[in-house]
Structure formats: C-alpha cells, structure tokens
Amino acid sequence: MMRLDHLPNQRTDEHVVLFLRRHWFAILAIVSAFTLLTTLPISIAWYFWDTVQVWLNHAVIGPLIVLLGSIYFLSIWLFAFLEFTDYYLDTWIITNERIINIEQEGLFVRTASELDLAAVQDTTAEIRGILQTLFTYGQVFVQTAGEKGRFHFKNIDNPEHVKEIVTELVEEDKRRLSALGAGGRGKIKSVIK
Amino acid sequence: MFDLPNIDIPIIVFLIIYGAYMLFYVLYSLFNVYHLLKYGMYGFGLYLLVTVFTGGTIILLAGSTYLLMDYDWSHPISLDDTVKFYNEDLFPAL
C-alpha cells in the first residue's frame, strides 16, 4: 500500500505538493455505462413482464434465464470495478523535488516512473473540446531535457493551475540547486543528498 | 423408420457452467483486490472501495440464490420436450 507520507525512495525534506488523479468526469463515464447496462434489461423485463413471468415459471427456461441474468449483472459489476480500479491507480504525485507518474493499464500492466524537477524543460497545459472547456479539465505535458520523452498527466482537473505549480516548483528547485552550488540538472541531486 | 433416442440431461448442468464462471469471477476479483491493496493509496477510500465491491457481489449472489432456490434441479432437459413448445406457450401475447 502506498502512503503519501512515505513515498518510494523519499528524500530528506521532500514533501508532496500535488496528488493528481483523472478528473471526476472519468468516474461519470463509468457510472453512466454501468447505469445504462443495468437499467436497460431491467426496463425491458418490466415492460414485457407477462412474457418474462411465463419464462421464469418454466422448469428449464426459468433457471437458465436466472443464471444468465446473474452472470450478466455480475459481469457488469466486475467490469465497473475493474474500470474504477484503473482510474483509482492512475496517479501523478508532484513533490518539491520530483514528479512520480504511476499508470495502470488494465490489470496486468503497471508503469511507475519518476523525474527530477531540475530535468524539466517545458510544461504545457492543454484543454481541448467543449466538455474539457466546460468542466475545466485536460492534459499537462511535462517535457524533459533528456531523451526520456515527456510525462503526460491525462484528463486532470484544472491543468493550467497544475502547469503553473509545476513551473514554479521547477524554478524553485533550480534556484535551490544553484544556491547549493550544484547548478546542474537531475542527476546532480543525488550528490546533494 | 429412424428413431432418435431420447436423452435426458438434468438442468443441474447449468449450475456447473455457472460454477465455472464463478471461479473466473472470484479469481479475477481477488486479483483486482490484491492489486488495489498493494498499489492503492492508503486511506479510508481504499477500504470503502473493497467493501462496496464485496457487498455488491454478495447482494447479487444472494439475489441469484434466492431466485434459483425454487427450481427443481433434477428436472430433465428432454429432447422430446423441445419440439413440443408452441409459440403461445412462450409468448402469451401471440
């Protein structure tokens, strides 16, 4: 179990500034799909109740329908839970020294990577489309100096605010490093600690 | 005249298929819960999530068991019976 006060490889004086998950709109999509898939067969059964009742009273068809119904609803429940787990385990942690990116893809793929703030070159916030504009969520891309590529905070709440915080933290970290006389990027941090 | 032999299979075979599905369900759920407890963020939300999922599963299984209790599981699925159904039997509105 992960704790925000005990991060993996936590450094002295390191503290969490932001803990991010995808915007609640992701949950809304899961809940909507779950509600639709649940209420649709129930509504159909309710509308054709006379016929369904005959089927349920049948000695062979009755148990078959109940078992199939049970499998159907259990599958939807499990699917919703898996989707929610995927949402729940996708996290981005921004501390005063680094960015930790944890991504869950399905049940069997998990990627955890981290990046020193001093290695950040550029931060971009992006809000695209009507929904993202209305609910103020979008993407933040954190570009690094090296060949590592970039970190992508997917569908997070208020990306512009997050971008500002990251930029401030990067500046602060760089100032701190130059005050300590290191003046370099990323790797030099391990010398300081 | 060629005669097909009548085969009677008890409807309990449905429960075997259901059992196989339940095995898959339990294994997948346990793996997911293990994942959550191992990598999830420590806090009340994590326990609430696992409790809600387990509770939902129990409710669904209890409901299914309640509905399945009244059926006679020794009732055979007879090949002869399958040809005796009429549309009016299964679709009373017709």
Image (cartoon, grey):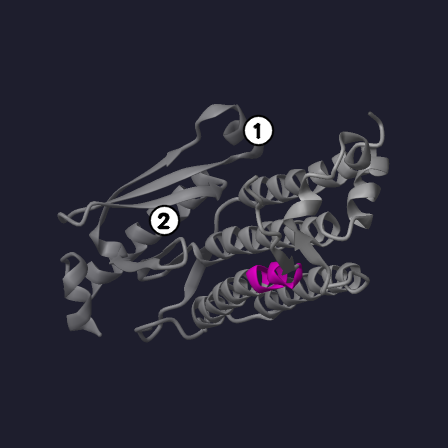
**Which label's residue is closer to the chain start, 2 or 1?**
1
Please name the residue shown 49% across and 68% down the image. B27
Q: Looking at the image, is A188 positioned above or below residue A46? A: below
Q: Which residues are magenta?
A: B11-18
Instruction: Give percent across and percent down for residue A75.
Output: 57, 52
Badge 2 element: helix
Query: Dot 1 surroundings within 10 Å: few (below 14), some, or many (20 or more)?
Result: few
Determine which residue is flagged by label 1.
A134
**Labels 2 and 1 touching (C-beta < 8 A):** no
SS for tag 1?
A: helix
Residue B41 seen from this side: no
In the rendered structure, which amino acid carries the disc numbered 2?
Val
Image side of residue B44 versus residue A8, left or right: right
x, y percentage for residue A104?
Answer: 39, 55
Distance from the alpha carbon under mark 2 to that under mark 1: 23 Å
Q: Which residue is mark 2?
A: A166
| Snapshot quadrant of residue B88 | top right
Can residue A103 be seen here? yes
Please give the chain letter of the residue carrying mark 2: A
- State left or right for residue B71 relative to residue A115: right
Magenta span has B15? Answer: yes
